[in-house]
Image (tube, rainbow, N blue to C red):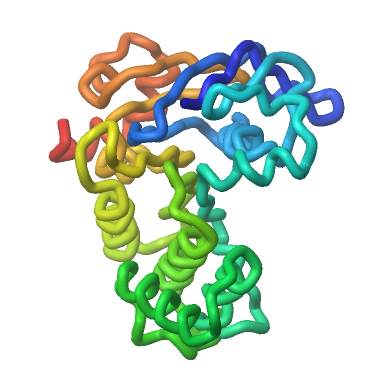
Amino acid sequence: MIAFQDVTISFGEKTVLRELSFQAEFHEKIAILGGSGEGKTTILKLILGLLRPDRGRIIIDNQDITTMSEAELRKIRMNFSIVFQEGALFDSLNVYENVAFCLREHTSLKENEIEQEVRRLLKRVDIEDAIYLMPEELSGGMQRRVAIARSLAACEPKMILYDEPTTGLDPLTAENICSLINELSEGSPPDRKGFIAVTHKVTDAAKVAERFLFVKDGKIEFDGNLEEMIRTDNGTLKRFINELLILGDSHV
C-alpha cells in the first residue's frame, strides 16, 4: 500500500503540493490528472524516495520512507518500476544493451541468461525485431516500449509508474501504448500488477485507468472512477475533461 499523509513540498518559493493525502493499493489502476506544473511527476518521485517532503509522511508497504537512508530506500524501490516521459534510454547503447544494463547491474545472471531475458522482455512489449537498433533509430512509440522493457528488467515490481506515457505520440502509437499498459496489468485484484500513470491526456487515461485523481493547486480536488469524473460538479475538473466529453469517449 502507498499512503501520502498531509504531504507538503516546495521548490524555492513555489509550493507544489499542499498537505496532499491519498492511499493506493499496489493492484490499483490509477491515473493522476492535472495541468503542467501541478506536481504530478513530483508525486512519482516522492513515492520512489527521489524527493523528500518538507512536511508530512509517505508510507510504502507499511514503512515510513520519509526519513529512510538511501540504502533502505533501495529495497522500497524494488516494489516499483518507472517509465519516464522521454524514455531516458542511454543514447550510446543499442536496444539490447539498454535492457541488459539493468540485468547486469541488479542480477547475478550469466551473459547467456541475460540474452534470454532481454529477448523475453522485448518480445513481451512486441519490439524484439529492434533489438540491435540505436535509440536514435527508434520512433517515439518504440522508445517507450524499450523503456518499459528496461523498467521491468531489474525486478518484478508490484506496481509500474508511468510519467506521461503517451505524450508526444501520434494517436495510433498512443493507442498501442495504452494497450500495452493494459496488457501489463491484466488480471484481477489483488493479484495483478497495478500502475500509477500521471498524464494530462484525459482520453488516454480513460482507456487504462479505473481510478482518477485530479490535482489542482497542490491538492487532490477529485478522487473517483470514470463515471463519477464525467458527472462531477467540480467546475475546474469539468473544464479539464472537456476533451473527453467532446469526443464522447466509448468508455463512458
Q: Position of residue 114 (x, y in %)?
A: 49, 79
Q: Is residue 107 left or right of residue 158?
A: right
Q: Is residue 230 visible?
A: yes
Q: Is residue 136 visible?
A: no
Q: Residue at x 51, y 51 (%)?
A: 81
Q: Position of residue 227 (x, y in %)?
A: 21, 22
Task: Look at the picture and state if 97 lies above or below 244.
Answer: below
Q: Residue at x 41, y 73 (%)?
A: 142
Q: Residue at x 57, y 81 (%)?
A: 97
Task: Look at the picture and state if 74 lies above or below 27.
Answer: below
Q: Residue at x 66, y 15 (%)?
A: 18
Q: Position of residue 144 (x, y in %)?
A: 45, 64
Q: Is residue 27 left or right of residue 135?
A: left
Q: Quadrant of residue 187?
A: top left
Q: Along the line of sight, which residue is nearer the eye, 141 or 82?
A: 82
The single residue placed furthest to the bottom in the displayed view is: 132
Q: Position of residue 235 (x, y in %)?
A: 40, 13
- Give the total of numbered labels: 0
The single residue placed furthest to the right in the displayed view is: 12
Q: Quadrant of residue 203?
A: top left
Give the quadrant of the C terminus. Answer: top left
Q: Quadrant of residue 239?
A: top left
Q: Is residue 192 left or right of residue 153?
A: left
